[in-house]
Image (cartoon, rainbow, N blue to C red):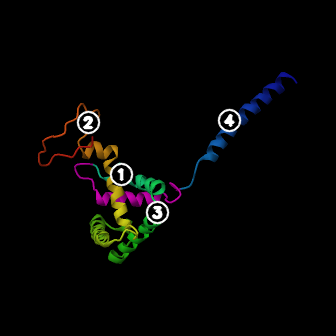
Amino acid sequence: MNRREAIGRVGLILGGTVIGAEFFISGCKSTSKKVNELFDQDNVAFFNEVGETILPATNTPGAKAADVGNFMALMVQDCYKPEDQKIFVKGIADLDEASKKKFGKKFMEADAKQRTELLTSLDAEQKAYTKTKKPEDPNHYFRMMKELTLLGFFTSEVGATKALRYVAVPGRYDGCVPYKKGDKAWAT
C-alpha cells in the first residue's frame, strides 16, 4: 500500500465515522408527539388550558406558566391506578363533549369566558357527585383534573415562589406567625 492509498482509506474511515454518527443521531430523534404511553403533546396543551382556566394568570403566573399539563400527564401515567387512568383519559372526551353540548365547539375552540363557565358547571357537578359517592364508585374526572392542577401549580417553582411566600433556606421554626389579611400562604 502506498501513501496515497493509505490517506484515501483514512479519509474514508473518518468520513464514514462522521456521516455514520450523524445518521445514527438523526435516526434516534423521535418524530412522535407522544409524551408517554397515555398522552401526546395535544393532550398536554389541553391540560395546560384546563389548568389555566382553573388558575388563570393574574398578578401572579397561572397554571400554564408552571406547565401543569406535563405534570398531569406524568402523574396520571406513573401514579394513578389503571381504572383512574381510564376515567381521566375518557374525561378529555367528556369535557370536549360537554363543551360541544353547551357551546357547539370543543373546549380548545371556546373563549376564556366560555371555558370558565363550563368548568364552573363541571365543578358543581363533581361536588354533587362526590357528596353522594360511595367508596366503590369511580372518581369524577374533573375532580382529578382540578386536584392535579392545584398540586402541580403549588409544588412548582413558579407556584411556590410567585404565588406563595417562600424562604429558600428557612432559619428557624416559627410555630405562630402573625397573619395579616391578604398575606400569601407559606410554601416552606
Q: CA distance from mark 3 to mark 2?
A: 36 Å
Q: Secondary structure at mark 2?
A: loop
Q: Which residue is mark 2?
A: 167
Q: Which residue is mark 3?
A: 85
Q: Which residue is rendered at x = 72% and y = 31% of the image?
A: 14
* Contact between labelled residues 2 and 3, with CB atoms less than 8 Å apart: no
Q: Secondary structure at mark 1?
A: helix
Q: Which residue is mark 4?
A: 18
Q: CA distance from mark 2 to mark 1?
A: 19 Å
Q: CA distance from mark 4 to mark 3?
A: 45 Å
Going from the N terminus, do you reach mark 4 or mark 2 first? 4
Looking at the image, residue 141 lies above or below residue 188: below
Q: Judge whether residue 50 is colored magenta.
A: yes
Say which amino acid is labelled 2.
Val
Q: Residues within 10 Å of mark 2 (few under 14, many from 20)?
A: few
| Nearer mark to the viewer, of 1 and 3 | 3
Q: Compare residues 111 and 44 and report the one nearer the observer.
A: 44
Say which amino acid is labelled 1.
Gly
Coordinates of residue 126 in the picture (x, y in percent) = 31, 69
Q: Which residue is rendered at x = 59% and y = 47% of the image?
A: 29
Going from the N terminus, do you reach mark 1 or mark 3 first? 3
Q: CA distance from mark 1 to mark 3?
A: 17 Å
Say which amino acid is labelled 4.
Val
| Nearer mark to the viewer, of 4 and 3 | 3
Which span of residues is magenta-colored?
33-60
Count of marks, rendered view: 4
Q: Which residue is mark 1?
A: 152
Going from the N terminus, do you reach mark 4 or mark 3 first? 4
Q: Which residue is rendered at x = 27% and y = 53% of the image?
A: 57
* Contact between labelled residues 4 and 1, with CB atoms less than 8 Å apart: no
| Nearer mark to the viewer, of 4 and 2 | 2
